[in-house]
Structure formats: structure tokens, C-alpha cells
Image: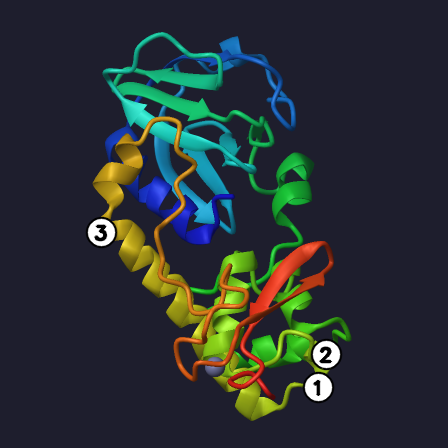
Amino acid sequence: MPELPEVEVTRRSFAEPIAGARIVALRLGKPLRWPLGVDPASLAGRRVLGVRRRGKYLLMDLDEGLLLWHLGMSGSLRFSTGLGAAGVHDHCDLVTDRGVLRLHDPRRFGAVVYAAGEADPVARKLLGHLGAEPLTDAFDVRHFHEGLRRRRASIKQVLLAGDVVVGVGNIYASEALFLAGIRPTVSAHRLGRVRVVRLHAAVRTVLERALAVGGSTLRDFSNAQGQSGYFQLETMVYDREGEPCRACGTAIQALRQGQRSTFFCPQCQKG
Ligand SMILES: [Zn+2]
């Protein structure tokens, strides 16, 4: 599943070349997770001003309205002048005078949604509950701590929920908790300031590391056809059940939390 770093690298791969492009047509294939919400023909002639990211959504500002793109479970976006006819898993082509932005999404959990603006109820429903952006100043220790103090669920699940801090998916939550030395099952409200400071730094570190890996493979990533765009990270705990911890050699353990697998080192993550 594309996570924040993959979405951000996707954004960087086409935000600049598409800025200023004029929309020629928007062509839809099979239904996606949510309907577009506007007659595609009405978008013709509008100009793309730029592309921002909020959590795992890409916000494409038009000179009138905006398009929200989400990659779902298996989506990927390519922007090129040299794309052939849409294939069986290509469900949206945004045709512009500078090239075609194509959503390839075999499982069709992705979506393209039109909203009049960010205050539009359609946009607010998708974006309104999102927590702080982890790589901006909005994600500070004090607010992070306040958000965690109000939650009794496990810290792993609170990270995944996305309403305290956004974009920390399953891989990055497991990795950040390892880096901070925190047991994934600890109730969020039990974390004191010292551990919150460590976790705050760890969340940033793992996401920045992934962005750096993604950035270095940006060329392959944006050119990859039919790939969902996982970055090849060397993980410390994620997907390493039974393997020796890279820090202490203890066997990594796995458990289920809210239908998701969590991986941790029982020795390094005692707190
Ligand atoms: Zn360890």
C-alpha cells in the first residue's frame, strides 16, 4: 500500500511538469472507490495550478476547484507524453496539453474526486479529520503529547489512526516504535514526555529516511509501470518475525493489533 513517502515522491515526480497545464479531457475507466462528483466534460479548459499533499491525498489545485487523488491499496500515477492506450487497470486519464496523468489501480481502492474547494463538504469529509503533517512544523512535541494523552488505545493503533499525526502507516509505525524503544502495545496516554520526545523524533526519522530512499529511486519509481511503488527499505523489525534484531540479536516478535501485524523486539522495546 502506498504510504506517505511514496505519495510524496509521486507528487514530486509530476508536480512541476504539470503546473500550468491546460486540461483537455478527463477519461474514466471502471468505477473507483468514490465517484468523481462532477461531469468530466466540465473540467476541459481548466488550468492546473499545482499539486499539494495532505496525508495520503494529492490535492491538485485548478483555476476553478480542485481534484483529490488517492492511490488506495495499489494505485500509482504516471505523467508522460508517451503513454499508449489505457490498459485494463488504467482507470483515470487526465489528458492535458503537457501530457497525460494516468491512474493505474488494479484493486480500484484509489479515487479521483472533484471538490469546489477545501471548504467543500466533499473535501472536508476526506481531509477534515486528518492529524498534523509529520514533516512540517505543525507536528510539534507539545501537540503530539496532548493528542496522545487523550487516547487509551495502544500507541501503535493511535499512530495508524491518523488523527493525531497523519501518514504513519503500518511499516513506519513499527519502525518508529522500534527506534524510540517503545512497546507497540503501550496505551498512548501512558507515554510520558521523555518517550513522546523520542517517538516524535523517530517518526520524522523513519519518514525522512524513506523519502530519501524514494527520492534516490525517483526515476525508477515514476517510470515503473504497474508497480505500486514500495520503497526497498531495510527495516529493523517490520516483516522480520523470528529473525534476529539488528541491534541486539533477540528474535523479532509479531502480534496482531486491529487486524494489522505489528513487529517488535522484546529486548529493545521494553518501555
Ligand atoms: Zn533488539
Where residue 22 sits, quadrant-wise, is top left
Q: Taking 248 as reference, is 81 left or right?
A: left
Task: Judge whether 115 appears above or below 125 on screen.
Answer: above
Q: Which mark is residue 216?
A: 3
As shown in the figure, which amino acid type bears the numbered disc 2? Ser
Q: Which residue is mark 2?
A: 187
- Helix, strand or loop under label 3: helix
Residue 90 is situated, as x and y percent measured from the top left of the image, at 46, 18
Looking at the picture, tell me which residue is in the foreground, 264 or 159: 264
Name the residue: 35% across, 37% down: 50
As shown in the figure, which amino acid type bears the numbered disc 3? Ser
As shown in the figure, which amino acid type bears the numbered disc 1? Arg
Q: Taking 200 as reference, is 100 left or right?
A: left
The residue at label 1 has a CB less than 8 Å from ligand 1: no
Where residue 135 sits, quadrant-wise, is bottom left
Is residue 101 at all visible to an observer of this figure? yes
Residue 225 is situated, as x and y percent measured from the top left of the image, at 34, 26
* C-alpha span from label 2 to label 3: 36 Å
- Helix, strand or loop under label 1: helix
* C-alpha span from label 3 to label 1: 38 Å
The residue at label 3 has a CB less than 8 Å from ligand 1: no
Instruction: Give the mark nearest the N terminus, 3 or 1.
Output: 1
Q: Which mark is residue 190?
A: 1
The residue at label 2 has a CB less than 8 Å from ligand 1: no
